[in-house]
Amino acid sequence: AQTVTQSQPEMSVQEAETVTLSCTYDTSESDYYLFWYKQPPSRQMILVIRQEAYKQQNATENRFSVNFQKAAKSFSLKISDSQLGDAAMYFCAYIGSGDKLTFGTGTRLAVRP
Amino acid sequence: DAGVTQSPTHLIKTRGQHVTLRCSPISGHKSVSWYQQVLGQGPQFIFQYYEKEERGRGNFPDRFSARQFPNYSSELNVNALLLGDSALYLCASSLVQGFGTEAFFGQGTRLTVV
């Protein structure tokens, strides 16, 4: 079975600074997708960024980028120029052939003004 | 366009009761999945439905059941509620059932069992 581990329960960053959230996963599959979801207090999960495992190039979406290390099974999220609106729970998630998302336990990000 | 809508947003039930949660997917989306998110944890997969058929089931007891209607909306039913069923229940819809298809989430139903 696939597992996703987020070892940072909480992180804090100064507004306008950069922060990196960590995620590791375990799988025996060779083809899969990885995601970072943001869950603000409104509770709705919002997709931040996705990475296809067979693509070596790291995904980027505006201020958000990932460092995908397939051999190490690591998938970290970097948020540049942090904004107050970035404060939320961030979940790393995996999907393989089973078509179901497997989530980590989340990292709560606080942004200090 | 309306996103994924779930109802009700909150409800309180007593142990042993039954509950029905509802989900309307984004227009045109044919796949609906349900997740349970216990406080302080990540969401756990419960069910996936596509074209009105169950396509996946997570490690949940038979007290949990679901169905999808011809208009692709879905219901999640939980019988004989336990205190441990207290959680945020999330519905996600996607255009098709396919590898890596993006899932869009609703705001969830917060269920409290007392």
Image: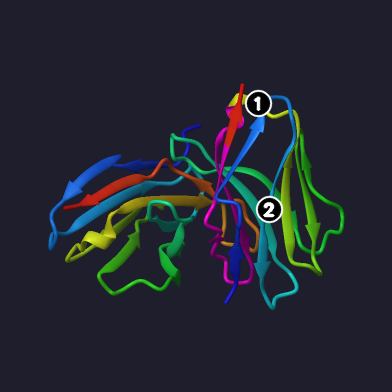
Q: Secondary structure at mark 1?
A: loop
Asked if B7 appears above or below B75 in the picture, the reply is above
Q: In screen coordinates, is A10 left or right of B59?
A: right
Marks 1/2: CA–CA distance: 19 Å
Image quadrant in which the C terminus of chain A is located = top right
Q: In screen coordinates, is B67 left or right of A25?
A: left
Q: In screen coordinates, is A53 left or right of A21?
A: right
Magenta span contains residue A90: yes
Task: From the viewer's side, name the closer residue of A48 and B8.
Answer: A48
First-in-chain label (1 vs 2): 2
Magenta span contains residue B22: no
Asked if A90 appears above or below B34 in the picture, the reply is above
Task: From the viewer's side, name the closer residue of A57 and B103.
Answer: A57
Inspect this view and state whether residue B73 appears: no
Residue hosting label 1: A83
Asked if B66 appears above or below B21 in the picture, the reply is below
Inspect this view and state whether residue B11 appears: yes
**Mark 1 neighbour density, 10 Å: few (under 14) some (14–19) many (20 or more):** some
**Chain at numbered mark 2:** A
Q: Residue at x 28, y 51 (%)?
A: B21
Q: Say which mark, if any, is on residue A22.
A: 2
**Mark 2 neighbour density, 10 Å: few (under 14) some (14–19) many (20 or more):** some
Give, as a three-letter code, the residue at label 2.
Ser
Give, as a three-letter code, the residue at label 1.
Gln
Q: Residue A106: image x %, image y %?
A: 54, 51
